[in-house]
Image (cartoon, rainbow, N blue to C red):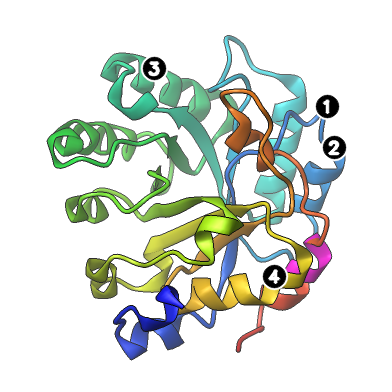
Amino acid sequence: MPHLTTPRRQSAATAADRMGVGVPGYAHPLVAPVEWGELSRPGAPLDWVALNVANGPGQRPDPHCLEAAGRLRNAGVPLLGRLDVAYGARSFGELVSDGHRFRDWYRVDGFYLDRCPTDRTDLPGVRRLTAMLSGLAEGGCRLVLGHGTHPYPGYAETADQLVTFSGPWTDYRWSQVAEWTADYPPERFCHLVHGLPRTHLEEAVRIARWQGAGTVFLTDRTVTGDLDGQNAAFETLPGYWDEIVSRIGPGVSE
């Protein structure tokens, strides 16, 4: 299988024993109350949770999102404001303005830059944006770039973590990792996989560990027919959430 034959440093493969979950954006707390409740449950192995009020922070503070954000903060879970970079189509000023609203209203710990560009030519613009955003969150700012695929290697120096895979299990099971990622520890990479049957959960965790991804989101939910179908697959709780928590929770290793 390709993910087993791709060269990796042995240290990267073994260092992934500690694995956590990154949540790219559950549905609104009114629509997904169970999901948001699970996020603040003690013992959930969460690295970060992205808050998406209305394709960003919205036009005014949302009381339901304020309550959900407060529960996560009290539980010690890092909360990221989701910013849609639209592959570079949105303006710098608009994104920074959204970042300020996330900070002022929801006291986020950082930002999840969804649909982040991947090309070398877009790197200066992303570097400028992350430099500005990094000064917004109090006590440090966690930045996750939602590329969804392996970007130009220089992006690894602009954020805390890169999403280097986002897609269906049918693609993930045959995926290959870019060799340059072996120069970085597992906590620098995240994989998001949808359409994953429960029977292949163990295999998916093994692939993530082997490819050096320290953060994952694995779900049996599938995409819908709309343009935002892939994000919709991540908006609900996986049917095997309890199994994920028990398999990669605190103190669990392989």
Q: Which amino acid does label 1 sit on?
A: Leu
Marks 3, 1: nearer the viewer? 1
- Quote the CA–CA distance across marks 2 and 1: 6 Å
Badge 4 is on which residue? Answer: 201
Whichever of callouts 2 and 3 sits on the residue coming sooner in the sequence is 2
Q: Residues within 10 Å of mark 1 (few under 14, many from 20)?
A: few
- Quote the CA–CA distance across marks 1 and 4: 29 Å
Answer above or below: position of 246 versus 134: below
**Residue ranking furthest to the right:** 34
Residue 47 appears in the picture as rendered: no
Badge 1 is on which residue? Answer: 30
Where residue 97 is drawn, which disc sits there? 3
Answer above or below: position of 82 versus 47: above
Callout 3 secondary element: helix
Marks 4, 2: nearer the viewer? 4
Could you tell me which quadrant the C terminus lies in?
A: bottom right
- Quote the CA–CA distance across marks 4 and 2: 25 Å
Callout 1 secondary element: loop
Whichever of callouts 3 and 1 sits on the residue coming sooner in the sequence is 1
Residue 134 position, x and y percent, is: 32, 40
- Quote the CA–CA distance across marks 3 and 1: 25 Å
Marks 4, 3: nearer the viewer? 4
Q: Which amino acid does label 2 sit on?
A: Pro
Q: Which of 42 and 169 is in front in this view?
A: 169
Residue 52 appears in the picture as rendered: yes
Q: Residue at x 45, y 79 (%)?
A: 210
Q: Which amino acid does label 4 sit on?
A: Leu
Badge 2 is on which residue? Answer: 33
Answer above or below: position of 202 versus 94: below
Residue 160 position, x and y percent, is: 35, 55
